[in-house]
Image (tube, rainbow, N blue to C red):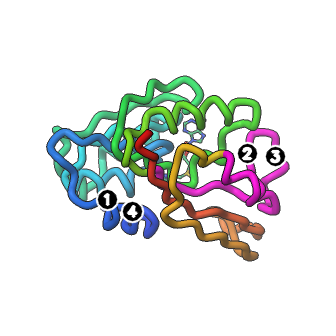
Amino acid sequence: MAGSPPRPLLRRALEMIGEPAPGDLAIDLGCGEGRDSAELLGRGWRVLAIDAEAEAIDRLRRRADLTGTDRLETLAARFETADLPPCRLLNAAYALPFCPPGAFGAVWDRCAGAIEPGGLFVGQLFGERDGWAAQPDVTAHRRGALDALLSQFIIEHLQEEERDGADALGYAKHWHIFHLIARKRDG
Ligand SMILES: C[S@@+](CC[C@H](N)C(=O)[O-])C[C@H]1O[C@@H](n2cnc3c(N)ncnc32)[C@H](O)[C@@H]1O
């Protein structure tokens, strides 16, 4: 099974950051079936793919389109406890909103701390009007809160999306999403 194609936001970020230097690490946090990990490997990155679900890691490793597996490390662990080594790119595609609010601050600080100066954060956060925002295990943000969250970063791309649609299972859902690419400041 080749699986889904990479997320457009990751592709945009990869155009911004250019080719990795030998040994450059990308963390794919909440990697799921590995659509973005496969792209990162294909472009020559060393990849640490992390997901709470062992089944997701298995599906990633079984992808037919996986290349450069000597550069792939996988970890079945939760964001809240996973060790995040220094990285040049941290990709969290539709993943960090599924961190409970009480843990989000510490998880975010560890993500931000892991990204090397000049490196990129790539991912989605939910806005306050997202249909899942009130769920106890979901963290959502107001637009106004993003500047403080991103104080160590320069915002390279921020797109706010709000629409009625469907979730992955086809149930009606209101989406309120921030698509974010942010570059870690030098000092
Ligand atoms: C919506 S999926 C996105 C998967 C993938 N990044 C993509 O774009 O297709 C969210 C993923 O985050 C993982 N996840 C959710 N909460 C997590 C947590 N606290 N720690 C680690 N992974 C988590 C889920 O297992 C799931 O694979």
In screen coordinates, is 169 left or right of 23?
right
> Foreground: 47 or 19?
19
Q: Few, some or many C-alpha atoms within 10 Å of disc 1 (few <14, some 14-19, many ≥20)?
A: some
Q: Few, some or many C-alpha atoms within 10 Å of disc 2 (few <14, some 14-19, many ≥20)?
A: many
Q: Few, some or many C-alpha atoms within 10 Å of disc 4 (few <14, some 14-19, many ≥20)?
A: many
Which mark sits nearer the N-terminus, 1 or 2? 1
SS at circle 1 = helix
- Residue 123: % across, % down: 52, 55
On the question of residue 1 being in view, the answer is: no
- Residue 131: % across, % down: 80, 61
Please identify the quadrant where the C terminus is shown: top left
Give residue 56's quadrant in the image: top left
Figure quadrant, ligand 1: top right
- Residue 1: % across, % down: 32, 59
SS at circle 2 = loop
* Residue 139 badge: 2
Q: Which residue is mark 1?
A: 17
Q: Three-letter amino acid code at disc 1?
A: Ile
Please name which of the two marks, 3 or 4, marks the residue nearer to the observer.
Answer: 4
- Residue 122: % across, % down: 47, 55
* Residue 13 badge: 4
Q: Magenta stretch? A: 121-148
